């Protein structure tokens, strides 16, 4: 005796194919992401030197880094004694923003405003046209002493 199903064979085959296809295309794989913007170059050679009128800061970026439009210059508060703990982070404040000149890869800025004598640290961070910050530069250190008149 043969048992007949209420569904015809072609309908079962089509239903099986639909179930297989739906299980393979299960929906959204991930959220959409905006296109990745290239990273800004890092200032690796920041140098600070004491001169008669203050501190001379110099640095460079790779030639052809046209995406850099400005630099933020940060200075720490003066440290007259050792830090309270070795792992404590230094506090920096923005002291100046300078425009990057097109076609230049070497930059120089002078800092003449000091609150007191002590040890100062500097960092420079590049910015692009959207004010997106690049990576921190290396830390440059100077010791400012009172001038004897």
Image: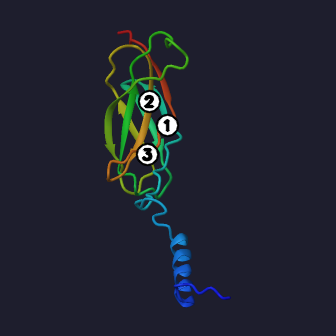
| Residue receiving disc 3 | 134
The structure residue drawn at horizontal position 45% and vertical position 51%, both measured from the top left corner, is 40
| Residue receiving disc 1 | 46
| Residue receiving disc 2 | 122
Of tags 3 and 2, which is closer to the observer? 3
Dot 2: what SS?
strand
Q: Earlier in the sequence, mark 2 or mark 1?
A: 1
**Quadrant that contains the C terminus:** top left
Spatial CA distance of label 3 from label 2 is: 16 Å
Horizontal and vertical percent for residue 94?
Answer: 33, 31
Q: Are marks 2 and 1 in contact (CB under 8 Å)?
A: yes
Q: Earlier in the sequence, mark 3 or mark 2?
A: 2
Horizontal and vertical percent for residue 32?
Answer: 42, 61
Horizontal and vertical percent for residue 88?
Answer: 49, 19
Of tags 1 and 3, which is closer to the observer? 3
Q: From the viewer's perspective, is 87 left or right of 130?
A: right
Spatial CA distance of label 2 from label 1 is: 8 Å
Dot 3: what SS?
loop
Horizontal and vertical percent for residue 36?
Answer: 45, 59
**Quadrant that contains the N terminus:** bottom right
Q: Assess disc 3: are there few (<14), some (14-19) or many (≥20) residues with their C-alpha within 10 Å of its C-alpha.
A: some
């Amino acid at each position: 005796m043969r048992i007949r199903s209420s569904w015809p064979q072609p309908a079962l085959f089509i239903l099986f194919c639909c179930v297989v296809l739906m299980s393979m295309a299960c929906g959204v794989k991930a959220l959409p992401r905006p296109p990745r913007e290239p990273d800004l170059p890092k200032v690796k050679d920041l140098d600070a030197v004491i001169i008669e009128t203050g501190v001379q800061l110099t640095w460079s970026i790779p030639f052809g880094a046209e995406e850099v439009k400005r630099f933020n210059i940060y200075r720490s508060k003066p440290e007259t004694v050792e830090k309270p703990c070795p792992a404590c982070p230094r506090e920096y404040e923005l002291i100046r923003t300078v425009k990057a000149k097109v076609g230049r890869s070497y930059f120089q800025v002078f800092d003449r405003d000091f609150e007191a004598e002590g040890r100062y640290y500097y960092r420079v961070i590049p910015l692009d046209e959207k004010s997106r910050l690049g990576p921190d530069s290396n830390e440059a250190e100077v010791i400012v002493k009172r001038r004897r008149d």
